[in-house]
């Protein structure tokens, strides 16, 4: 029964990975940019939430939309002021820009808030659990996180499939040259994708901070690795692939932890490498957004 419980916990853990990976997948699917600053943006989202609660007394639940709105605005500014120019230069320039952001963000956070952890407590919700019977339990917070992941990915799927803006995003992903010839402003399309990506990574960062009870500036180095692994396991550019990739990585880490406390990261990396070797395009990998 311990193994079943470990798998269940891994599925719940996959929720945070999936939310973090969704923005990464969207940016790559639309702009073909591997955002190396994704993990640091996740940490920045956690800091916005934590500091809004600490400094301004914002209720913990409200810190979620606050963080999403703030990073959404940051995303629009970054796209218009930095990435839009980088996309018109050499192919490697946008990646180098995101690498620069990944260096700048944690160092700015250290200068502003020191290297100490900034807490964001969710109180008893962090330890409360639901008894499923038969020795199986699931924490309420991981369950809420997983439900949020499904809701976010469902909303993103509906947006891409059922709305005009979403169809333009998909068309830009498939054939940006033809879309530009039809009079679509690619800058607006890219800005929309970046705002959504930054908002979702802010949600992931806030949930991660709540789960850990706090956040430090350099945790992005590890979280970006989880996001990349989840999105590659599921398939670059696939919305639902991010959920499958997140669950796969979460289960791998949980099973590794059941074997030994030293193995979660190693087992997760091994599963990632196995999927990469057997199916390089990922489980649901496609050439465009789906």
Image: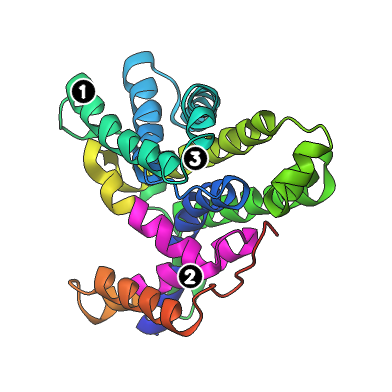
Q: Which mark is residue 233?
A: 2
Q: Report the residue marked by disc 1.
A: 113
- Give the class, few, some or many, for how many residues have Cα within 10 Å of label 1's Cα (few <14, many ≥20): some
Q: Report the residue marked by disc 3.
A: 203
Q: Position of residue 242 (x, y in %)?
A: 55, 61
Residue 120 makes an appearance in the image: no
Q: Is residue 158 magenta?
A: no
> 124 or 122: nearer the eye?
122
Q: Is residue 282 above or below residue 104?
A: below
| Magenta-colored span | 224-253
> 160 or 258: nearer the eye?
160
Distance, label 3 to label 2, CA atoms, is 21 Å
Q: Is residue 228 magenta?
A: yes
Identify the secondary structure beneath mark 1.
helix
Point 19% across, 27% down: residue: 110
Q: Is residue 122 left or right of residue 89?
A: left
Q: Is residue 264 left or right of residue 210?
A: left
- Give the class, few, some or many, for how many residues have Cα within 10 Å of label 3's Cα (few <14, many ≥20): many
Label pair 1/3, CB-CB below 8 angstroms: no
């Amino acid at each position: 029964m311990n193994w079943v419980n470990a798998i269940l916990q891994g599925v719940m853990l996959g929720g945070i990975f999936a939310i973090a990976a969704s923005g990464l997948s969207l940016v790559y699917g639309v702009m073909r940019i591997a955002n190396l600053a994704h993990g640091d943006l996740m940490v920045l989202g956690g800091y916005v939430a934590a500091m809004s609660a600490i400094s301004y007394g914002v209720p913990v639940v409200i810190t979620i939309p606050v963080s999403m709105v703030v990073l959404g605005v940051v995303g629009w500014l970054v796209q218009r002021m930095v990435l839009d120019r980088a996309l018109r230069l050499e192919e490697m320039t946008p990646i180098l820009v995101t690498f620069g952001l990944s260096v700048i963000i944690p160092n700015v956070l250290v200068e502003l808030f020191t290297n100490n952890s900034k807490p964001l407590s969710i109180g008893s919700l962090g330890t409360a659990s639901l008894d499923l019977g038969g020795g199986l339990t699931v924490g309420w917070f991981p369950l809420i996180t997983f439900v949020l992941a499904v809701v976010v990915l469902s909303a993103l799927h509906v947006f891409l499939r059922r709305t005009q803006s979403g169809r333009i995003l998909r068309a830009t992903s498939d054939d940006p040259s033809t879309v530009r010839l039809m009079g679509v402003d690619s800058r607006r399309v890219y800005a929309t994708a970046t705002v959504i990506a930054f908002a979702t990574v802010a949600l992931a960062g806030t949930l991660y901070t709540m789960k850990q009870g706090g956040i430090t500036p350099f945790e992005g180095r590890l979280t970006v690795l989880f996001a990349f692994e989840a999105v590659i396991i599921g398939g670059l550019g696939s919305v639902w692939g991010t959920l499958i990739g997140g669950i796969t990585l979460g289960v791998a880490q949980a099973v590794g932890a059941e074997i030994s406390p030293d193995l979660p990261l190693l087992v997760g990396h091994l599963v990632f490498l196995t999927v990469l070797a057997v199916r390089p395009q990922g489980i649901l990998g496609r050439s465009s957004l789906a």
